[in-house]
Structure formats: structure tokens, C-alpha cells
Image (cartoon, rainbow, N blue to C red):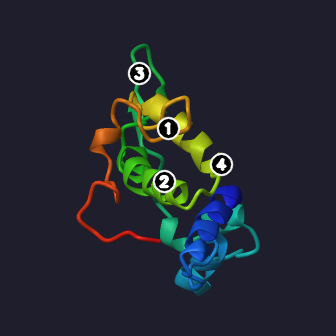
Amino acid sequence: MKKASHEIVSVARSLNLSEVPEVDEMMRQFYGDNLKDPSTIKSIFCTNIGYVGLTAPMKEVEGGGYVPDFHYRYLSEDIPNGLCLVKEIASLLDKATPTIDMLICWAQEHLGKSYMSSTGQLNGKDAHTLISIQQSQLDYSL
């Protein structure tokens, strides 16, 4: 998570968005006293009072037991509408995002989607479903 955070902040800084913090700092600012141990990213997520009672979405499988529900919004929305958008912006800036690329590849495999091809470009068969700066009417000149 720290490596992905660094990549996101690097992209933001390339756009002169210096106020975008690393994920751990953002969590400390947002949750403050609700964090029993704010010393690491792991402890922030594990000791956040705001997360008490939240569980990982699971699905029961035939024969008993459970597996993660990979189609829950944490992946099915956050990957195409979050990391893929950061990836597109980074590509426009010619910035490498190896950790984000790895996360997109892992997630798309579990989602049964193909946003990013083996070339590292967002041109897989499902890329047309992504929010795209290049296909919008916005002036995205950098």
C-alpha cells in the first residue's frame, strides 16, 4: 500500500498538487484520535475505531467455507474508477506505476475483466468501460 501511495503522490506532485498526502498521513489527519496506534499503515487500519464491525465481504462456496467476494465494490468500483484513472494520468505524464500496474493486473484477474493489457496500457477488452480523461470533453492539457 505504501508503494502505491508513493506512486499516487508522485503523479499528484507532477500536477503541482502538493497538498495530496501519503495514505498514512491522510488517514492520521482524517481519523485522528480514532486511531489507537497511528504508527504504521497496518496499525492505522487495524486499530481504527471507525472500522470496528466492518468485515471483508465473503461468499459461501459449495461444500462449505468462504472465499472473498471479489465483485464487491472494493474491487469492482475502486479499481476501474480509482487506480485505472491514476494509471491513465500517470501515462499522460510518462510516469511509471509498477505497483499500481501490479494491483490492476491482480484485481482484473479476480474480477474477470481486462482493463490493462500485457503491454501495460489501458487498452484491454474492458478498457472502454473506464472513466477516461482522454475520452472526456475536459481540457486535460498538462
Question: Where residue 107 is drawn, which disc sits there?
Answer: 1
Q: Amino acid at mark 4?
A: Thr
Q: Which mark is residue 56?
A: none
Give above or below for 140 relative to 130: below
Question: Residue 99 got which mark?
Answer: 4
Q: Is residue 72 left or right of residue 33?
A: left
Between discs 1 and 4, the one toward the N terminus: 4
Q: Quadrant of residue 27?
A: bottom right
Q: Would you call the spot at circle 3 few (<14 residues within 10 Å), some (14-19), or many (20 or more)?
A: few
Alpha carbon of mark 3 to alpha carbon of mark 4: how far?
Answer: 31 Å
**x, y percent for residue 131:** 31, 54
Q: Residue furthest left?
A: 137
- Identify the mark nearer the N-term, 1 or 2: 2
Label 2: which residue?
A: 83
Q: Mark 2 packing: few (<14 Cα in 10 Å), some, or many (20+)? A: some
Which residue is more in the foreground, 91 or 5? 91
